Image (tube, rainbow, N blue to C red):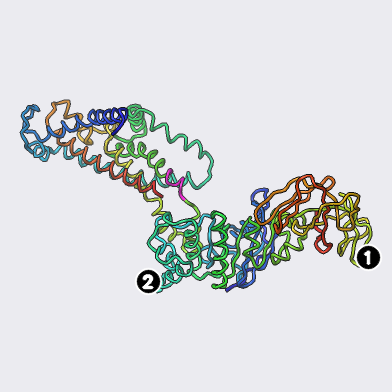
Amino acid sequence: MSEVNVIDAVKRYDSVVALGGVSLRFAEGQLFGLLGPSGSGKTTLLRAIAGFVTLDRGRVLIDGQDIGGVPVHARNIGMMFQNYALFPHMSVAENVAFGLEVRNLPKSEVQARVKDALGMVRLTGLEARRPKQLSGGQQQRVALARALVTRPKVLLLDEPLGALDKHLRQEMQIELRRIQRAVGITTIFVTHDQEEALTLSDRIAIFEAGKIVQEGPPMEVYERPRSKFAAGFLGEANFLTGRVEAISGGCATVALDVGGQAQCALETAAAGQAVTLALRPEKIGFAPAAAGETPGPNQVRGRVTDVVFSGNSTTYRVAVGEQTMTLFRQNLTGSAIAPGADVLLSWSGDHLVAVTP
Amino acid sequence: MQSLGARLLTGYLWLVLLFLYVPILVMAAMGFNASPLYALPFDFDLIWYRELAGNAKLINAGINSVGIAVANTLIATALGTMAALAFARYQFRGKTVLQLLLFPPVAIPWLVIGTAMLVFFYWIGIKRGLVAILLGHVALSLPYVIVVVGARLATFPRAVEEAAATLGATPWQTFRRITAPILAPGVIGGALFAFAVSFDQFVISYFLAPPGTTTLPVEIYGAIRKGFTPEINAISTIIIVVSMGVLLLTARFYRFGGEK
């Protein structure tokens, strides 16, 4: 088990900045998700840790030791590639044995460890198959067994589940998590799938344009996003803009641009300051609006424009002033609210999070 | 019950095959007929194969042909594979131009290339002979090797080399155990092409061979001009068997390569 530290990593490709000074600590045994849109630098960071990318500046430390000058094959890492990169001319057992054979381990030990590894990923019995004779999920398991059998210090996963269909992906998420816990290996994985990042990770870091915009446990990042980008990329969010009218004891009253008032805790705001508040769709309550009723604080009136039924929940889009807000309802009872209905949206001030625009 | 159209098509296919193979079969059969004048009835005899065994000129030409074809295969495959790797993996000035220039020699008539080579070799002082023939053959077969190996490289999954490195394989171990085996069908296919181009080559060899030393196709041509003996049938049959063997091997490796 090992700790990985990345310190001030910088990488440029011609004029494009892939990594603009990234520092991260990957603690022992943790499963760390790097999340961001394509081109945001997350894959470059993973490949720098693997040794395929040489940083322009900054260092990568494994257990405190700078591995900058160590070639890929001497880093003792395990890596799973996007399309698994199984060796097409070798059987399942030969694929898994490869990393042990190049280390010149005795044959009996190679056989025993290959057997254990295939047992761990539940592929016993398929030793003689070629990769192309396996399903996508089975190929994935071979790739995982092959990456772990050498007992690497760190496991790197590049979009590990991207090539699987939704059902298999959920199954493999649970499986991956089980194996990672059992082995206790420090794991870093790259994904652009926010749900995958939330499900799998102990901690996540959100990348934007070569920088980390926020880092922390998934729930913290989801509930308290710091920037508009982080709030929008991890889950869905409504953004309400406004101006601080009054502030007393950390409790601010904000005049919203769509009309009405919001009351929420704001630490650093001063009266007159413009703010952007993020509000998650599932945290908005709504009810049919009675005519002539005046919305109170943390309430706005709107008109339903779209109703999208998706089984366990329904998504409503509601026009509020110039803005469209999105909200989810669990389908506890049959919905009576149809497009065109006037509704009153309300929320708790605790759920408003000030974000940088 | 097949439809009329399908049966017509099958019949047409058989006609084409007959048209192609009957002359060859007749020629091969006559090699086993005792009559030097191709007279019937057929009288089975190995006399022409015995004659052939005593014909030092044809045998020498045969040895030259095989020797040149083997040397050509080794040189052209090695150079062609390296060139294909360079084209597939590196960016360099003039790459596109070089790649385009590979194809015209395949399309230019060998007669023209042969004349050009004769003039050029004379001009730079390479005498007609086996070395000149070999150089000519290598130049001719290089584009075939580059194209065949290049096709294999185009579908080569680069990530497997990276995977091997992360598993602890040194660059040499990666090449030996991953890259080479995956590329092998393409390289073998290219090598078989190079062998076939050289072994069947007449025009270039004819132009570049000095009097006295020659290759099998050139010697057969000379022998036919003097008088067509069934000995020629015998040697032609041997050549056909060898060429077909090479072709079948190529087909086998191509299918093998196509699976991946």
As shown in the figure, which amino acid type bears the numbered disc 1?
Answer: Ser
Compute the Cα span from label 1 to label 2: 73 Å
Of residues B63 and A292, which is closer to you in this image? A292
Residue B174 pos. (x, y %): 44, 59
Give the residue drawn at x 30%, y 42%: B195
A352 magenta-colored: no
Q: Chain of mark 1?
A: A
B154 magenta-colored: yes
Callout 2: 10 Å neighbours few (<14), some, many (20+)?
Answer: few
Residue A133 visible, this orientation: yes
Residue A352 pos. (x, y %): 81, 60
Q: Is residue A339 above or below residue A198?
A: above
Q: Which residues are magenta?
A: B150-156
Instruction: Name which of mark 1 and mark 2 comes first in the sequence.
Output: 2
- State left or right for residue B95 relative to residue A258: left
Q: Is residue B20 above or below residue A27?
A: above
Numbered disc 1: secondary structure: strand
Image quarter for residue A345?
bottom right
Image quarter for residue A11?
bottom right
Image quarter for residue B244?
top left
Of residues B141 and A87, which is closer to you in this image? A87
Of residues B67 and B128, which is closer to you in this image? B67
Of residues B106 and B28, which is closer to you in this image? B28
Residue at the spot of label 2: A107
- State left or right for residue B123 relative to residue A121: left
- State left or right for residue B253 relative to residue A193: left
Give the residue drawn at x 40%, y 56%: A89
Residue at the spot of label 1: A248
